[in-house]
Amino acid sequence: MLTLAAGFAPLDWLVLGAYFAVLIVTGVVFALRAQRSTDDYFLAARRMPAWAVSISILATSLSAATFIGGPQQAYVGDLTYLASSLGMMLAAIAIAIWFIPAFYRARVATVYQLLDARFGPTAKRSASAMFMLGRVFASGARLFIVALPASLILFGEPPDTQHIPAWQLVAAIALMASVGIVYTLAGGISSVIWSDVLQTFVFLAAVVAAITLLLVKIPVGVGEIARVLAEAPGSAAAGSGDSGKLTLISLSTDPRAPYSLWAILVGFTLLGVGAYGTDQDLVQRMLTCRSARAGSWSVIAAQLVGLPVVLLFMGVGLLLFVFYQRPEVMGAAAPLSAPDDSRTIFLNFILREMPAGMTGLMMAGLFAAGLSSLNSAINAMSSTFVSDFYTRWAPDRDPVHYVRVGRAAVVGWGLILALFATGCVFWQRSSGQTLIDFALGVMVYAYSGLLGVYFTALFTRRGSTASVVAALAAGFLAVVLMEPAAWSLALDLPSLRWMLGQIDVLRAASPATPSGVSAQEGFLRALSFVLGLAFPWKLSIATALATGVCVLGQSARADAVVTSPTSEPPPR
C-alpha cells in the first residue's frame, strides 16, 4: 500500500526546507534587533503599519483549522460557514467603534489592564487568567489540527485511516510546538507580525495552486461543476434542507444548526467581539499600531480580505467533492477511491495527486497557517503573564529583566499548549465534530465570561470586583454544563440518580401532580435539547448569564469610566 509519506518527493522536501530556512533567517534578523523593554518586545513600540497588522490578524484568525477544516466543511456540507463572515464583520465594526479607542485612551499593554481602572486589580488578573485558560483551549486545539498533516508526512498513512495512532500525533505536536517556541523567542511581536505577512502569502499561493490544479484535473467546465454542486445534497442535518452544496445562507430555525443566519447574527457576532475585543492574542496586534484609528481600520480590513480567502479554502472543498464523489463527472480521470477520513481529505489530495514541488509548497502553506497562530498565541500569553502578573510580584525591576522573563514564559506556554493539544487528540475523536466546529467550539469557554465583563465595563456603570470574578466563573461553568461530556460523567453519579428518583416518588404521592413522564425522563429530554444546541447558541446563553451576573455588582469606581473622551491618547 502506498503511504502518504511516499508521495513526498525530494523536490518537496527541498521546497519545505526552503520555507523553514526563510523562516529561520527572518527570525535571526529580528533577534539581532535590540529588545530593550517590554514595550519593544510585546507592542513593537507601537510602530507597526496598519496593513501589516491587518494581514497578521487575518493569518492568526484563519490558522490551520481553516486550511484543513475549511475544505472539510465544504466537502461534507455546503457554503453556509462562509456566511459567518457577516457576524465577524459586524463584530469588527463594533470593536472599531467602542473597544479599540477605549484601549488606546487607557494606554494599556494588555486589554485586561483596562479593567483595573474600572473594577480593580483583582478583576484585571481574573480576566487575564480566563484569557490564558481560553487561549490554551483554542490554540491547543489548533496545534492538534496542524499535527494531523505533520504526522502523515513524518510517519505515512496508518492502516486504519480513521484513527491515526496517538503517539504519532503527539510526536508531531512536540515538533511543531518546538518550532513555534524557538521562533517566538527571537524577536517578540514584531517578528510574529512580519512572519505572519510572509506566511500569509505562502498559504494563499498554496490554496490558489490547489484550485488551479483541481480545475485542470476535473474534465468539465466551471458551469458543469456548478450544476453538479447545486444538485448535490448540502448540510441537511445542519438545517440547510434539500438545498445544494452552493447554499450560502441557511434560514433554518433548528438550534442545532451552527451556521444558520440567526446563529450567525447573534452567536458569531458575539464570537467576533470576543475574539477581536477581549482576546489579547488578536487585540495585541491592534495595539501595535500608531493610533487608535489605524488599529480600528486594521481589524475591519482583516475581515474584508478574509472573506475571499475563506471562500478560496471552501472552494477547494467543493472541487474535492466533485473529484472524489462524482465519478460520473470525472470519467477516466476518477481516483480509485476516496479517503475514509474527511479530516484528511485535502491532505490526501496534496500528498497523492499533486506533482512534485507543488506538494512541498502546499505543506509549507499549511505549516505557515499553523505556525502563524501558534507564534502569536505564545507571545500573547507571555505578554499577559508579564504585564498583569509578574510585574506585580517583582515590581521596579530593570526592563531587560522583564524581557528575559517574557522569553521564559514563551517556553512555558509553548509546553502547556503542547500538553493540551495532546489531550485534543482524544477529545476531538470522541466528539465527532468537524475540525472547524471543534476549533470554534473550544473558544466559547473563555469568551462567554469575558464578553459579559467587557459589556458591563464599557456600556454600564455597574459591576464590582466580586461580580467580575463571579461572571467569569458563571460563563465558563455554563458552557461546561452544556457539554455532553460533562453530563455523561454526571449521570453516572448515584447521588443525581437518587435525587431524580425521589422527585418521582414525591410526584406520585401528590394527588395534585398530573400524570405524565417521569422526572428523570423529563429532565433527560430537556437536557438533550440543551446539549444539542449549536455552539453559537451556547455562547449566547452563557454570555447573557455572565452579563447578568456581572451587572449585579455595584461599582465603587463608577466614575472611573475608561472610555472617557478626556482621557489622554497614547503617544505616537
Image (spheres, rainbow, N blue to C red):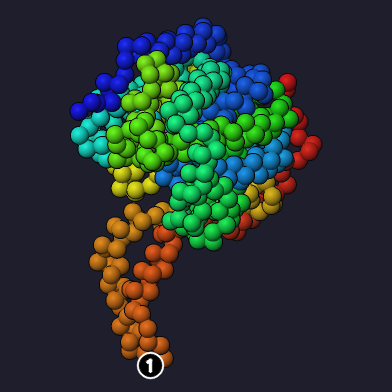
Location of the N terminus (image quadrant): top left
Location of the C terminus (image quadrant): top right
What residue lies at 44% left-to-right and 62% top-to-bottom?
530
Front-most of residues 349 and 56: 349
Q: Is residue 551 in sight in this rendering?
A: yes
- 350 in relation to 253, above or below: above
Q: Tell me residue 253's x, y (percent).
A: 54, 61
What residue lies at 62% left-to-right and 31% top-to-bottom?
305
- Identity of the residue furthest to the bottom in this view: 511
Which residue in the structure is indicated by mark 1? 511
Q: Amino acid at mark 1?
A: Pro
Q: Say whether residue 567 is left or right of residue 70.
A: right
What residue lies at 24% left-to-right and 66% top-to-bottom?
494
Front-most of residues 197 and 569: 197
Q: Tell me residue 454's x, y (percent).
A: 61, 46
Which element type, helix, strand or loop, lies under badge 1?
Answer: loop
- 502 in relation to 68, above or below: below
Q: Tell me residue 313's x, y (percent).
A: 50, 33
The total of numbered circles placed on residues is 1
Q: Tell me residue 231's x, y (percent).
A: 48, 49
- Disc 1: CA contacts within 10 A as few (<14), some (14-19) or many (>=20): few
What residue lies at 54% left-to-right and 48% top-to-bottom?
247
Quarter occupied by residue 194: top right
Q: Say whether residue 332 is left or right of residue 42.
A: left
Quarter occupied by residue 518: bottom left
Q: Say whether residue 327 is left or right of residue 299.
A: left
Front-most of residues 170 and 345: 345
Front-most of residues 127 and 545: 545
Q: Is residue 182 in sight in this rendering?
A: no
